[in-house]
Image (spheres, rainbow, N blue to C red):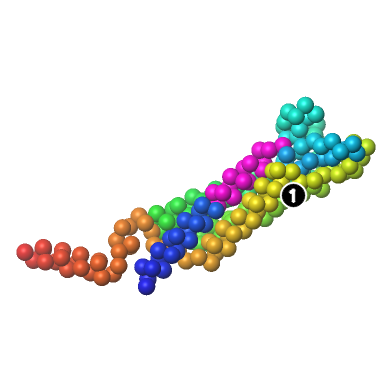
């Protein structure tokens, strides 16, 4: 029974790890794109705006210039910081899961508590990216901007937030697998006892 529980816990950890990698890829794509949202003009033309870049009329994406950054109202900075911090925390959790599965939970600082808090931080920080819609620079109604709507990278950020949260639930509620670094830990107790008896017989002979 114990060996079955350990196998189930290991499979759940592998699933959590794969979902976390998927969330990381979505998170990275959302911050590198200049199409997080689309700023619509009164003539229904759209221009892409990203967390770190924006789209020119020619379709070329350029990073936010110093002038643009000086005119941030704080929402843009908050969204950008969240976009960078979320995958960073997620990557740390991925490393913790690898260490936990290979060497055991004792090798992870804080045990299960630290990765759980880091995953929760990823969920929160990825959610901060949507503060870009509160930008007065890109989304405030004016003669040139009518409204802002979510674009491709914005939808990726939504998915990343969801999968970070799913990974958080799976990690929090899932059991802790036996470390794979110790092959003996994956054997049944009866097998270990049998090997011990065989070793004693060899020593006696």
Give left or right: position of 186 versus 161: left
Q: Residue furthest right?
A: 143
Horizontal and vertical percent position of residue 175: 47, 66
Q: Looking at this view, is 24 or 65 the one in front?
A: 24
Task: Give the residue drawn at x 59%, y 50%.
Answer: 23
- The residue carrying mark 1 is 130
Task: Give the residue drawn at x 51%, y 52%.
Answer: 18
Quadrant of residue 36 within the rendered picture:
top right
Q: Is residue 176 magenta?
A: no
Give left or right: position of 137 versus 53: right
Give left or right: position of 119 versus 196: right
Q: Looking at this view, is 147 or 122 the one in front?
A: 147
Q: Quadrant of the C terminus?
A: bottom left
Q: Residue furthest front?
A: 44
Q: Looking at this view, is 96 or 173 the one in front?
A: 173
Q: Is residue 195 visible?
A: yes
The span picked out in magenta is 20-34
């Amino acid at each position: 029974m114990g060996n079955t529980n350990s196998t189930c816990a290991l499979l759940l950890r592998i699933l959590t790890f794969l979902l976390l990698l998927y969330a990381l890829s979505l998170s990275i794509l959302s911050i590198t794109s200049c199409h997080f949202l689309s700023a619509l003009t009164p003539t229904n033309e759209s221009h892409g705006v990203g967390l770190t870049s924006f789209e020119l009329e020619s379709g070329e994406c350029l990073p936010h210039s110093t002038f643009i950054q000086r005119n941030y109202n704080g929402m843009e900075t908050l969204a950008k910081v969240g976009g960078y911090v979320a995958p960073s925390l997620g990557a740390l959790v991925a490393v913790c899961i690898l260490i936990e599965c290979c060497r055991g939970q004792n090798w992870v600082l804080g045990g299960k508590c630290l990765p759980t808090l880091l995953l929760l931080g990823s969920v929160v920080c990825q959610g901060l990216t949507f503060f870009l819609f509160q930008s007065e620079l890109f989304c405030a109604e004016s003669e040139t901007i009518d409204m802002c709507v979510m674009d491709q990278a914005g939808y990726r950020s939504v998915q990343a937030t969801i999968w970070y949260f799913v990974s958080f639930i799976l990690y929090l509620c899932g059991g802790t697998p036996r470390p794979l670094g110790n092959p003996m830990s994956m054997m049944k107790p009866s097998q270990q006892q049998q090997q011990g008896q065989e070793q004693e017989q060899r020593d006696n002979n």
